[in-house]
Amino acid sequence: MRAHEVTRGAILLLGIVIAILISSSEAISQADFYKGKTITIIQGRDPGGTGDLRIRPFIPFLQKYIPGNPTIVMEFMPGGGSRKAANHIYRSARPDGLTIGNMSSGMVSLAVLGESGVLYDLDKLIYLGSPYSTYHAIFVSRKEAGFNSVEKLRAASGIRVGGQSVGFSTYNEGRLFSFMLGLKEPKFVTGYGGAELDPALMRGEIDARATGADTVVQRNREWLEKGLVDFHAIMEIPKGDKHPRFPHLPEIETFAKSDRERKLLTMSRAFRVAGAPFILPPGTPKERVEILQEAFRKTYRDPEFHKEYRKLTGEDPTPLMPEAHERTIREIPRDPEVIELYKKLVGAAPLPPR
């Protein structure tokens, strides 16, 4: 073999060795990155509500599965149906893998609908999945109001329907039920934190609200045991998924009067299937994204996480993995006519005519 060929081969081998060493060094560096660090999860909601309870079980498992076992803390940034928090993650949070957002499903619908104040791009955010992809929205009224049937709901005028901020999921669903059930000039009362709506209902500050069926079973057992509320209708997400405690309630689509209204419900379900997105800012280094996505995958699959989640929320997690979450966001229907109707429904103006 000629000398120059030996030299060239040696140089090539040396290059390969150096590349392997650099790659290994970078992998070790990334694995060590989170050691001694603090990760902040910014929640786009008030503390104490159902959404907050769904996030609490994650903390010990993420600490376990993120190499370096970082400290994890919560920060709450309510406002605009998670608009404020999503804008912060997208525009202001450092893309260093140390700030994670968790938003309500309103973050997705607001962007698809092109609502004002949305300064983030759904397609540029980085997704870490969601703890749930099924949900059962339920419409209830307090027993003392005397609306023990859909007919009585329709006959009354000015029923006060409680919600959080305009654009928040409970507000949107309260409006959707009111529209589909045919309530007469309902009044929508906002400004409550997640944990404040149920006491407000019991005090008579509001007459009705939309909530989660699992929330009722877990947090409001006295409603069931003492008959404190009337249950009127349910929205199955996905359609056909019957709730074991409320299989007898009429599904919201049975009240639809047109194909347009059925498409409206299809879009509403799609927004909810997106769940409560965990997100990272655009530009987060790929290696840290992969570390965090894998930690979330391991958490979602851990049987002990499922037990802890069930204990705190009263419901089984139905996780969306990061890659499936990104696909779900991309495939949400975007029919202009239905978007226009949905925007009217979730806005602050009176409900549109049917």
Image (cartoon, rainbow, N blue to C red):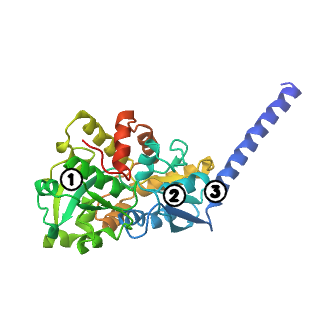
Q: Label 3 near label 2: C-beta < 8 Å? A: no
Where disc 3 sits, the SS reads loop
Residue drawn 19% across and 38% down?
Answer: 257
Residue drawn 52% across and 67% down?
Answer: 75
Residue drawn 51% across and 62% down?
Answer: 42
Label 3 Cα crowd, 10 Å radius (few <14 / some 14-19 / many 20+): some
How far is mark 1 from mark 3, CA to CA? 48 Å
Residue kind at label 3, given as amino acid type: Arg
Q: Earlier in the sequence, mark 2 or mark 3?
A: 2
Q: Quadrant of residue 66?
A: bottom right
Q: Is residue 198 above or below residue 236?
A: below
Residue farthest to the top, as pictured: 2
Q: Is residue 9 found left or right of 106 in the rendered image? A: right
Camera-side mark, 1 or 2: 1
Where disc 1 sits, the SS reads loop
Q: Nearer the viewer, residue 299 or 4?
A: 299
Camera-side mark, 1 or 3: 1
Camera-side mark, 2 or 3: 2
Label 2 Cα crowd, 10 Å radius (few <14 / some 14-19 / many 20+): many
Residue kind at label 2, given as amino acid type: Lys
How far is mark 1 from mark 2, CA to CA? 32 Å
How far is mark 2 from mark 3, CA to CA? 16 Å
According to the image, label 2 marks what residue?
84
According to the image, label 1 marks what residue?
184
Report the quarter where the N terminus lies. Answer: top right
Visible residue check, residue 270: no
Where disc 2 sits, the SS reads helix
Residue kind at label 1, given as amino acid type: Lys
Q: Nearer the viewer, residue 3 or 313?
A: 313
According to the image, label 3 marks what residue?
94
Q: Earlier in the sequence, mark 1 or mark 3?
A: 3
Q: Is residue 271 above or below residue 308?
A: above
